[in-house]
Image: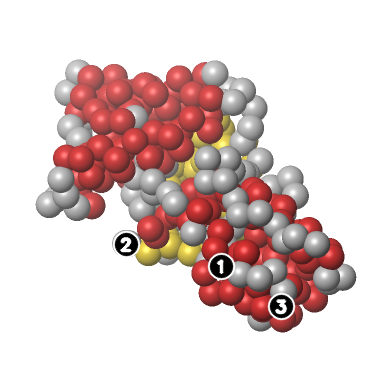
């Protein structure tokens, strides 16, 4: 019986790779947990590969070919699924984000990527790499704007973000860019497309002073949490870790301004930036 055909890169490589993995696993008579044990990963990790919410890395592709006897299919085709326009440290998170049904995010130092305007994204990426070519910056901004198209859907994913007041008051790209950014966020709030709360300076110490956090939920895969730092990022599916950080997010929500007051503050900042009254 012929083996599976190589994937067509013009289709959805990760989704097809995940479907082939599920088929090969079931054909071998293994559960997700049993296959995970053979790869020294969790059953939920296998589920995320099958659902396409997690990228298949070459080392796992080789092990899958060995365990499932697929004749090098996964090793050959994980390259087609690996192409991405995002920064290397953010690839997995961006791809998981695209499949999520719910995103809870705390932004500490900058406006969340899904809420950014092109001008703001350009200023951020230029700050990340002052020596990058304009073509490189253009590509990064394009990737960021592609992510924001998730919000073109009227209801999914649900985005609930708590934005630190520091992110709104840090002048990134100039006052005009900030005024546009504030107006963009308020537009999304008024369209009921996002839930946004501001964590004010007056809240004092809070549950996420160590850094930003992002939790993602999916229809057919376990939830993930994404950790990031300068030039680094990783996904974690450990249930205890996810649960602990979900509790931290709940504490942030409790410390943040209510939605109405958050909207009023962002609108006031838009006016201040536009009229050069921002302190």
Q: Which residue is mark 3?
A: 67
Q: Any mark on residue 230, and which? A: 2
Q: Which residue is mark 1?
A: 75
Above-or-below relation of 142 to 43: above
- Left or right relative to 46: residue 12: left
Above-or-below relation of 69 to 253: below
Q: Residues within 10 Å of mark 2 (few under 14, many from 20)?
A: few
Give the image quarter of residue 28. bottom right
Q: Secondary structure at mark 1?
A: helix
Q: Looking at the image, which residue is at 67% across and 78% down?
A: 66
Q: CA distance from mark 2 to mark 1?
A: 30 Å
Q: Mark 1 and mark 2 in contact (Cβ < 8 Å)?
A: no
Q: CA distance from mark 3 to mark 2?
A: 36 Å
Give percent across and percent down for residue 5.
Answer: 66, 54
Q: Any mark on residue 271, and which? A: none
Q: From the viewer's perspective, is the residue at label 2 or at label 1 nearer?
A: 1
Count of labels shown?
3
Residue closest to the eye, 277 or 219: 219
Q: Secondary structure at mark 2?
A: loop
Give the image quarter of residue 193. top right
Q: Residue furthest left?
A: 131
Which of the two labelled residues, at mark 2 and mark 1, occupies the earlier sequence position? Answer: 1
Question: Is residue 110 among the parts visible in the rendering?
Answer: yes
Q: CA distance from mark 3 to mark 1?
A: 12 Å
- Left or right relative to 231: residue 9: right
Q: Quadrant of the C terminus?
A: top left
Q: Residue furthest right?
A: 29
């Amino acid at each position: 019986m012929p083996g599976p055909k190589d994937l067509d890169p013009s289709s959805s490589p990760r989704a097809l790779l995940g479907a082939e993995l599920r088929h090969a696993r079931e054909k071998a008579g293994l559960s997700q947990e049993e296959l995970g044990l053979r790869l020294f990963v969790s059953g939920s990790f296998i589920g995320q590969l099958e659902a396409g919410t997690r990228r298949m890395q070459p080392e796992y592709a080789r092990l899958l070919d060995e365990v499932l006897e697929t004749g090098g299919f996964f090793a050959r085709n994980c390259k087609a699924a690996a192409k991405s326009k995002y920064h290397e440290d953010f690839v997995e998170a961006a791809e998981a984000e695209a499949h999520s049904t719910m995103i809870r995010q705390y932004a500490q130092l900058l406006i969340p990527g899904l809420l950014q305007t092109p001008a703001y994204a350009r200023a951020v990426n230029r700050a990340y790499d002052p020596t990058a070519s304009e073509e490189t910056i253009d590509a990064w901004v394009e990737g960021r704007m592609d992510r924001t198209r998730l919000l073109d859907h009227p209801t999914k994913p649900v985005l609930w973000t708590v934005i630190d007041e520091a992110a709104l008051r840090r002048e990134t790209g100039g006052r005009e860019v900030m005024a546009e950014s504030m107006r963009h966020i308020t537009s999304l709030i008024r369209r009921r497309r996002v839930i946004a709360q501001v964590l004010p300076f007056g809240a004092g110490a809070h549950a996420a002073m160590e850094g930003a956090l992002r939790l993602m939920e999916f229809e057919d895969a376990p939830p993930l949490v994404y950790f990031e730092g300068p030039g680094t990022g990783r996904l974690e599916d450990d249930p205890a870790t996810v649960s602990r950080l979900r509790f931290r997010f709940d504490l942030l929500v409790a410390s943040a301004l209510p939605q109405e007051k958050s909207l009023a503050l962002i609108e006031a900042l838009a006016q201040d930036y536009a009229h050069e009254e921002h302190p």
